[in-house]
Amino acid sequence: MALGVHSFADYVASLPSGWSSFPTCQVPHAVFDMLDEELAQRGRRRATDMFAAVAGRPVPAQGWVPEIMLNAAFYLVREHFDDDVAFDRFNHEAAMSLYRKPLYRALMTVMSPTLIIMGMGKRWTAFRRGTELAVKHWKQGDTHQVEAVLTHPAGLHTEESLGLLRVNLVVALQAARARRAAVRLTGHGPGEARYELSYT
């Protein structure tokens, strides 16, 4: 994990090979589309425009985009919100908007929470390339418990970007109509992050 990273500049400086770092780690352009739509609805500048202005290079217009661009862009977007609570709320609403899109709705909203969890490793590949998510599920009374382990190249993620992924996992459960869905980032180190999920 890139430590001591608190800004766009910090993150870019931490990348071992600059913008050529981690080329196999990618996200679908739909994630940027979702960010731009949600920001536009709030009268704010698009994430793709912010990134291009500061980085001096555009976000690819379609297909799969380097995940480092998304991680960096989130630092720029964060500057437009007063605090972490407001930023988390924005990311929650943006992720829910993405899961409602036709391409992803069938993956995320038509199955039970348990079926979503059982297939979460496979579904991860619809949203990420170059990283892996493994899950272990059990039940304790009426509560479902899940341990999710994200494996990624060391230096790709920061504590902030792993926190954003926590929000995405919460929304995935809520989109599947889970009750009392909760996700905690319980540990992280170079190349790995662990999350604890629960729902009823």
Image: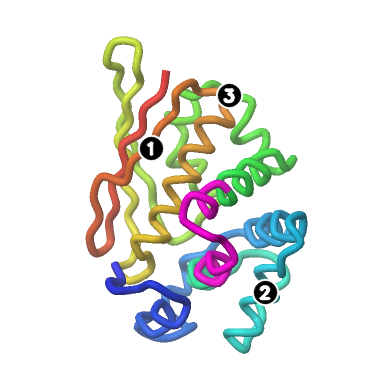
At label 2, counting other C-alpha atoms closer than 10 Å, the crowd grade (few under 14, some 14-19, many 20 or more) is few
In the rendered view, would you say 143 is above or below 63? above
User: In terms of image quadrants, where is residue 137?
Assistant: top left
In the rendered view, would you say 119 is above or below 39? above
At label 3, counting other C-alpha atoms closer than 10 Å, the crowd grade (few under 14, some 14-19, many 20 or more) is some
Q: Residue at x 41, y 77 (%)?
A: 11
Mark 1 or 3: the one toward you: 1
Would you name the residue on which mark 2 appears? Answer: 60
Q: Which numbered disc flags the more N-terminal residue, 1 or 3?
A: 3
Q: Residue at x 43, y 75 (%)?
A: 7
**Residues under numbered marks 2 and 1 in contact, where contact means CB atoms less than 8 Å apart:** no
Question: Left or right of 170: which side holds 102?
Answer: right
Would you name the residue on which mark 1 appears? Answer: 183
Residue numbers of the magenta segment: 73-89
Visible residue check, residue 70? no
Q: Which mark is residue 111?
A: 3
Q: Secondary structure at mark 2?
A: loop
Furthest residue in direction top, as rendered = 141
Amino acid bearing label 3: Met
Per the picture, the main secondary structure of the magenta-coloured stretch is helix
